Amino acid sequence: MTRIFFSRNFFEVLLHYTTIISFIITPLFISCKEDPTSIGMEIFPDADIINAFDTVISVEAYTIEPDSLYSRGKSLSPVGNYHDPVFGKVMAGVVTEYGPMYDLYFSDDAVADSLILQLYFHQTDYYGKDPMDGLPDIKVYSLNSKLYDTNYFASYEPDYNPQPVSASEATLTKYEKDSVWRDTTIINIKLSADYANLIMSQRNDSINETEFKTQVFGFFIKAQEGARDGSVVYLNLSNSNSSLTLYYHTADNKTHTADFTFSTYNDITFNVVKFDRTGSDVAKVINDTIQQDSVIYLQSMGGTVNYLKFPDISDLKQSLRNVSISKAELILPVEERDLSAEDYPKPDQIGLRYITPDSKKNRLNDDPYFTGSGGVNYFSGKYSDDQKAYIFRLDNFFQQYFAGSLDFKGLELYVGDMVSYNYGQIIDIEYNVISLNRVVLTSGNNSNPIRLKLYYVPY
């Protein structure tokens, strides 16, 4: 524990004693025998001295399998399959409705020629291996039942026909654009004639979007595990380049098209992720809150979260009694010996909740959800390349704890995603169900442990 001194009239005294202070500071560069935190204190009146302290609080940390996360209506949809040597196998897919752009009408003599599904993603939006070197083996399946207007979880098991309706392998088309526009990368998949005929099953009858969805329920799009797996692409279904086009002709040899779109407003869309940890490092420690390992494992999209405990903080609170917390810094070092991190990058942002004594999870009052966009850099949770760690500022939270106005039994650490509300005025670090990321952090049982550093002033 370090003792630090401040003066109540610091600036007045500093101006008055400029010469004296200069005289005192000069020997500091020559000799290190005197405690630097007390240099110059003899010039201050005793009544003006404030004693400030800092201390490091030990943290216990564990890897936990979380409750599944809501995954409906997100801006991106990961689709792919890869095998992480530390975290295990990951399969990501998307369940979605789609609808016609206009009311449909097919005459009795209409004959389907082809049905082409196009899925847009930007070529830099992927995780794992570069899909330009080997696209995931994406398959398309038809849903057996209608989706309902409710929340869906990332762990949801969709009701789908195990026989794919995709009739060809997924291929890439890349359209180069000028320097103003990003490249457009489209996955092309030809669907089966049987599925095309299902779409055209109603003849000589105009069908609107609502009626269409009572007959055709949508897709489950996912990747097969195989020789070409190893990456996940982030589809943008709301982009105008994502579409389904039916090409058909009539008896008079005229060709026609019917266009369908995926809408985040009119259609139900949600992400699905499956984790297979068999034989992985994570499998050895997950959900063990008794034996603390030397590292903890953190993964997005409902993979893992971390449970942080502070076994000594209650005793410290009792011994300190009345203190003012000037700074509380939670430091979470990254385990730099994780060589697989080059292929599976860490997240830019992680989030934090506190767990109440009755096991509810609440936002901390330092969270930018309460402090607004100006609080993002203060609360942080972002990776610091200088410190090789994620850093949180929790001044207000621990001030309330030591003041006795709140209690907690631990913190929950998760991979976060920045979400803004009210035209960007309020920022929320919410659970990430959009993109796959993971990171290995040190625990409290490590030579470079996770730690909480408190700066406080008794009163």
Image (cartoon, rainbow, N blue to C red):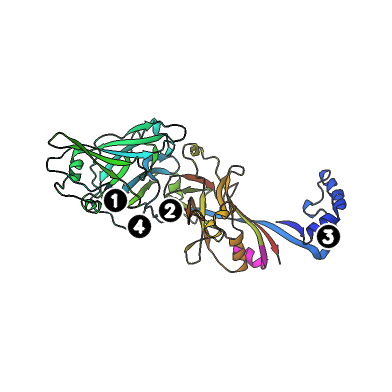
Which secondary structure lies at badge 2?
A: loop
In the image, what residue type sits under mark 4?
Answer: Asn
In the rendered image, residue 11, in percent from the top left (x then y), is placed at 79, 57
Instruction: Please tell me which residue is depicted at 53% across the width and 47% down the height of the picture.
Output: 441
Which secondary structure lies at badge 4?
A: loop
Label 1 vs label 2: CA separation? 21 Å
Quick check: 126 above or below 446? above
Instruction: Please tell me which residue is depicted at 26% across the width and 42% down the height of the picture.
Output: 259
Label 3 vs label 4: CA separation? 63 Å
Mark 4 and mark 2 lie on one chain; the one further toward the N terminus is: 2
Q: Which quadrant of the figure contains the N terminus?
A: bottom right
**Magenta residues, as a range?**
310-324
Which secondary structure lies at badge 3?
A: loop
Instruction: Please tell me which residue is depicted at 84% across the width and 46% down the height of the picture.
Output: 26
Give the residue at mark 3.
44
Mark 4 and mark 1 lie on one chain; the one further toward the N terminus is: 4
Q: Which mark is in front, 4 or 2?
A: 4
Q: Which mark is in front, 1 or 2?
A: 1
The 10 Å Cα crowd at callout 1, few under 14, some 14 to 19, many 20 or more, is: some
Q: Which mark is in front, 3 or 4?
A: 4
State the mark number for residue 65. Answer: 2
In the image, what residue type sits under mark 3?
Answer: Phe
In the rendered image, residue 381, in percent from the top left (x then y), is placed at 55, 51
Mark 4–mark 2 CB contact (< 8 Å): no
